[in-house]
Amino acid sequence: MLLGHIKSATLNLSCAPDAAQPFVANPSAGPCEEPANLPALLAEQESGGIIHDGTLTVFGPSVNTHAQVTSASFDLREVLNRDMSVEFTLTRFDMTLADTSAGSFDFSRAEVALASPASGWLEDEMIRFAPGMLQFVVTASVAVDGEPLFDGAPSSAEYTNSTTATAVRGVDGSFAFVDATFQVGEHTATLNTEPAQIIPAQ
């Protein structure tokens, strides 16, 4: 029986070891320039589209209203990794809403814009955005009991999704929000849209 102990050892790590001799150190390789354990990129695509229909439903105390989406457009980026996972990033989302009322409040010229890119993960045809990932800036002119606030000038506020938001990226090349819910005080606002055709960027 052989007994002994190691007095000293040198561990050499490499970002890109030689497949033929993976355990042979290469002193000239230099330090790693990229974080380890990140999926390797296989393909990337940027695209966009136009949404023609959708609804923003606001529900809460004394309020149950539906604001129609009059126009919306979006840009997105999809990354296929070597492990076959797909990163999905909504890079732009702009939307206008029809004038609507909620209780004693009247909203006109409402616009919604994505404040910063939102990352999600695509599994099968379902995209999931973690709570707080979707940050939307809502701008509108507001009146209370018929009296305009701020002399009718538009005001803005930012809202984030309070629960996991879901969208569909169909195999037919379409995109749609299924359930994106935001907490607005005591009320909840839920966005869903009709499928829109995705057009790859040129």
Image (tube, helix red, strand yellow):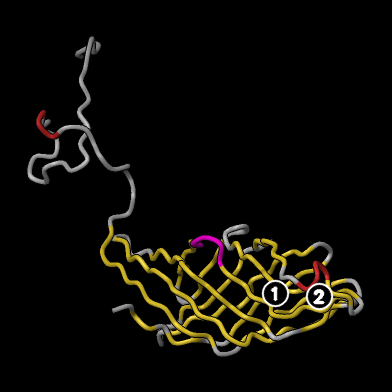
* Residue 109 numbered mark, or none: none
Quadrant of the image occupied by residue 104: bottom right
- Which is more toward the observer, 10 or 145? 145
Residue, x 41% and y 83% (percent of image)?
Answer: 198
The residue sitting at 52% across, 73% down in the picture is 93
Q: Quadrant of the C terminus?
A: bottom left
Q: Which residues are magenta?
A: 114-118
| Magenta segment main secondary structure | loop
Look at the image and say whether residue 19 sits in the magenta stretch. no
| Residue type pointed to by label 2 | Phe
Indicate the position of residue 135 as horizontal and vertical percent values.
Answer: 60, 61
The circle on residue 59 is 2
Q: Are marks 2 and 1 in contact (CB under 8 Å)?
A: yes
- Please name whichever residue, 51 or 7, is drawn nearer the observer in this view of the structure: 51
Query: Amino acid type of disc 1?
Result: Thr
Name the residue: 48% across, 76% down: 74
**Vertical comparison of 12 with 197: above or below:** above
Q: In the rendering, at what x and y percent does residue 143 appear?
A: 84, 75
